[in-house]
Amino acid sequence: MAMTIVEIPAGPSEIRHTHPGALAAYILEDELILEHEGRPTATYKSGSSVLVEAGKIHRGINNGSVTVKLLATLVFEKGKPANSPAP
């Protein structure tokens, strides 16, 4: 398991990617737009959380004017990469 603070600056987005295990994210500051395979695009505000299932293509987007901060907890098999770019 890995826990990390993720910061997405205003304007850019993450690349589309996957994780080998489940990812739980808790939004610490501002709001995150999440594109998630199999779900409609959704906005998560500070204080909310979201679960991304293993292998699902997703990306976080920050259309705001300040950095989005979130606490990400990833459960995955030791020795596997934490994430992989999606096509």
Image (cartoon, helix red, strand yellow):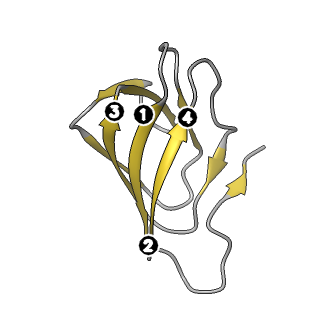
Viewer-nearest residue: 41 or 74: 74
State the image coordinates of residue 77 (x, y, percent, origin top left): 54, 82
> Where is residue 39 drawn, in percent x and y?
42, 33
Mark number for residue 75? 2
Considering depth in this image, is 37 or 74 the residue closer to the camera?
A: 74
SS class, disc 1: loop
x 45%, y 31%: residue: 68
Numbered badge on residue 29: 3
Residue 9 image point, x, y percent = 58, 28
Residue labelled with disc 1: 39
Disc 3 to disc 4, how far (Cα)?
A: 11 Å
| Label 4: few (<14), some (14–19) or many (≥20) C-alpha neighbours in 10 Å | some
First along the sequence among labels 1 and 3: 3
Q: Nearer the viewer, mark 2 or mark 4?
A: 4
Quote the CA–CA distance across marks 2 and 1.
Answer: 21 Å
Residue 81 location, quadrant: bottom right
Q: CA distance from mark 2 to mark 4?
A: 21 Å
Q: Residue furthest left?
A: 47
User: Pointer 2: residues within 10 angstroms few (<14), some, or many (20+)?
Assistant: some
